[in-house]
Image (cartoon, helix red, strand yellow):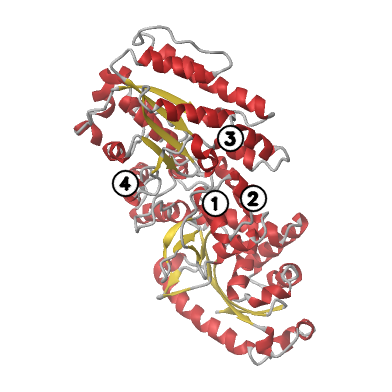
């Protein structure tokens, strides 16, 4: 199989026989949704390929290729009357440079539009009745010339705009003092971007531009355009389009089984690979109603390409091309109370919930307004590091971390928040390695007491519980190269706090499978002060009356979970179980359960 990793050219995929999952059945659905549409998805989620699909379907110059390109696909069996009826013009704002002052960025925008119009003229030169004037500095004049030429034909224009918010978002989150000023100069008053969208809006009023399809990541820029372009319908939460970009479990399983057969994998090995993909890449939902989750398509293709070439799982499950999403978490962490939002997302109890997803917040809100949790959670949803997770008992929307790849980004950011000293992080890794080799949790607990617990001040005691302790251990022990990290896996009809199951290809090394259960005892419950607790010896600490029952409770739970894990993994499991009790944020008591 040929996997189209990094390829967003529909024509190339079909004519060169690449792996392709048919979504053309949505073309008639989208036609009925309106003439000017806005579709949002996170970065590298297949938006550009969808625009390429639309371009090939509606392009009047490709009418002779319709059967070759679409005859075997859903829409080819029942095409709409609009197929191959348009001149198609494409803009891609991710190609517009966001550096320089506002005038330089405006010039870059005009150069891009002019360049695409020049491509348009070259491509359609045999079908256009007359010359098109390309104004060297004013792309609006060039666009008007295109519309004038098209008006002399039986066809109209379909405009596709990819990553409409890309360079504007870069300006908004650049962190540079001039970022907002340059952004405002583009979008306020007669700014270049606002003027361009006003021209697009005007052209749809009977002047030859019939349809517009816009993709992007967030609604930020359209919010700031206001009257400049307020005619696009938001379709990105439509249930019918939940899996327009992304793969379903059935589609992944089918492709993976073909690759596994070529590698001569057994059924159990294939199932293991599918579980890896599910854990790391599945979990996205893009509508508020219940719907099957979808896989990140870029990461899924990355995995299958690596899997096919080497007949093993890739060591690094996060494609480095998606690593820049870390910047969005860093932005939230820099806001007042933003760190708490990230912690809440990791801890998941109570779930991160909001009454409605924010869909109208501009850069002014991002840079100057006070940020509440719903704003920050909505921001993280649009950028793909949170997704819909159902509703609370009060009907509020739950946003959750979709999968282990996204969780890793949170864990890294939380670790940087709690332990910003790089040398301390290195010391933590050394303590973790020592624990994995010896099974002695003492060095890890000592590190947590000496480093992590000093981060928390008295105000944290109001909400502290075992979830906080679990988060600390998760950030310290997190290792997705060697382990499948699962916070609260379902075991024996209950949920263990943290499991670390060795990845199949890493079982050749001396790595133990790990299971943790955490308990928290408030200082007030123990009737002790922080100073008193700090002064206790390890033996005296264990003798504190409220500690022993919590250790026993955790141990009993671990015994149940051990049975469930052994039933699932059998003889492969090298399980070590640990009960950990935190007395305030001062001391830890641990016990290995054998």
- Give the position of the N terminus as an image quadrant: top left
Pointer 2 with pointer 1, Cβ within 8 A? yes
Q: Is residue 478 left or right of residue 7?
A: right
Q: Residue at x 60, y 32 (%)?
A: 186
1 vs 4, front mark: 1
The image quarter in which residue 344 lies? bottom right
Point out the frontmost of discs 1 and 3: 3
Q: Which residue is mark 2?
A: 331
The tag earlier along the polypeptide, 1 or 4, is 4
CB contact under 8 Å: marks 1 and 4? no
Give the residue at mark 3: 187
Furthest residue in direction bottom, as rendered: 545
* Residue 374: quarter of image: bottom right
Which label number is shown at residue 254? 4
Name the spot of residue 34 as percent of width and height, x first: 33, 38
Residue at image point 65% right, 88% down: 525
């Amino acid at each position: 199989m040929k996997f189209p990793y990094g390829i967003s050219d529909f024509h190339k995929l079909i004519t060169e026989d690449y792996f392709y999952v048919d979504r053309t059945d949505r073309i008639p659905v989208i036609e009925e949704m309106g003439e000017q549409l806005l579709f949002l998805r996170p970065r590298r989620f297949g938006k550009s390929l969808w625009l390429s699909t639309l371009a090939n379907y509606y392009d009047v110059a490709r009418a002779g290729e319709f059967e070759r390109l679409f005859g075997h696909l859903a829409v080819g069996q029942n095409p709409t009357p609009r197929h191959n009826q348009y001149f198609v013009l494409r803009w891609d704002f991710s190609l517009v440079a966001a550096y320089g002052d506002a005038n330089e960025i405006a010039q870059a925008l005009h150069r891009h539009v002019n360049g695409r119009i020049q491509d348009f003229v070259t491509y359609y030169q045999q079908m256009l009745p007359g010359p098109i004037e390309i104004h060297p500095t004013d792309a609006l004049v060039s666009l008007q010339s295109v519309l004038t030429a098209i008006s002399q034909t039986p066809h109209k224009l379909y405009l596709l705009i990819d990553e409409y918010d890309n360079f504007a978002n870069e300006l908004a989150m650049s962190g540079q003092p001039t970022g907002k000023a340059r952004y405002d100069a583009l979008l306020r008053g007669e700014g270049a971007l606002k003027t361009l969208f006003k021209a697009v809006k005007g052209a749809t009023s009977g002047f030859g531009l019939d349809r517009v399809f816009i993709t992007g990541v967030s609604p930020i820029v359209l919010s700031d355009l206001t009257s400049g372009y307020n005619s696009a319908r938001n379709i990105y939460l439509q249930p019918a389009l939940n899996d327009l970009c992304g793969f379903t479990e059935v589609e992944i399983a089918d492709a993976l089984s073909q690759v596994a057969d070529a590698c001569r994998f057994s059924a159990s090995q294939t199932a293991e690979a599918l579980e890896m993909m599910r854990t790391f890449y599945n979990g996205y939902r893009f509508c508020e109603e219940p719907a099957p989750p979808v896989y990140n398509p870029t990461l899924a293709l990355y995995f299958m390409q690596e899997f096919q070439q080497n007949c093993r799982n890739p060591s690094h499950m996060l494609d480095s091309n998606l690593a820049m999403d870390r910047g969005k978490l860093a932005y939230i962490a820099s806001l007042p109370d933003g760190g708490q939002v990230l912690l809440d997302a990791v801890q998941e109890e109570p779930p991160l919930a909001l009454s409605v997803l924010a869909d109208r917040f501009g850069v002014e809100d991002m840079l100057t307004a006070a940020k509440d949790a719903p704003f920050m959670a909505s921001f993280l949803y649009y950028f793909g590091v949170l997704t819909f997770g159902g509703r609370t008992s009060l009907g509020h929307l739950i946003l959750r971390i979709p999968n282990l790849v996204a969780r890793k980004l949170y864990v890294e950011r939380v670790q940087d928040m709690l332990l910003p000293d790089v040398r301390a992080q290195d010391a933590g890794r050394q303590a973790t390695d020592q624990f994995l080799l010896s099974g002695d949790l003492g060095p890890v607990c000592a590190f947590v007491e000496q480093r992590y617990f000093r981060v928390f001040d008295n105000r944290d005691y109001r909400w502290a519980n075992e979830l906080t302790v679990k988060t600390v251990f998760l950030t310290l022990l997190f290792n997705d190269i060697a382990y499948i990290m699962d916070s609260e896996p379902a075991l024996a009809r209950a949920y263990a706090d943290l499991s670390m199951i060795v990845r199949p290809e890493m079982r050749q090394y001396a790595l133990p499978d790990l299971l943790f259960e955490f308990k928290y005892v408030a200082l007030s419950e123990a009737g002790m002060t922080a100073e008193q607790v700090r002064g206790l010896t390890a033996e005296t600490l264990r003798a504190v009356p409220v500690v022993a029952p919590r250790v026993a409770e955790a141990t009993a739970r671990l015994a149940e979970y051990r049975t469930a894990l052994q039933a699932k993994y059998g003889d492969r499991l090298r399980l070590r179980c640990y009960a950990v009790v935190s007395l305030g944020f001062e001391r830890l008591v641990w016990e290995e359960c054998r």
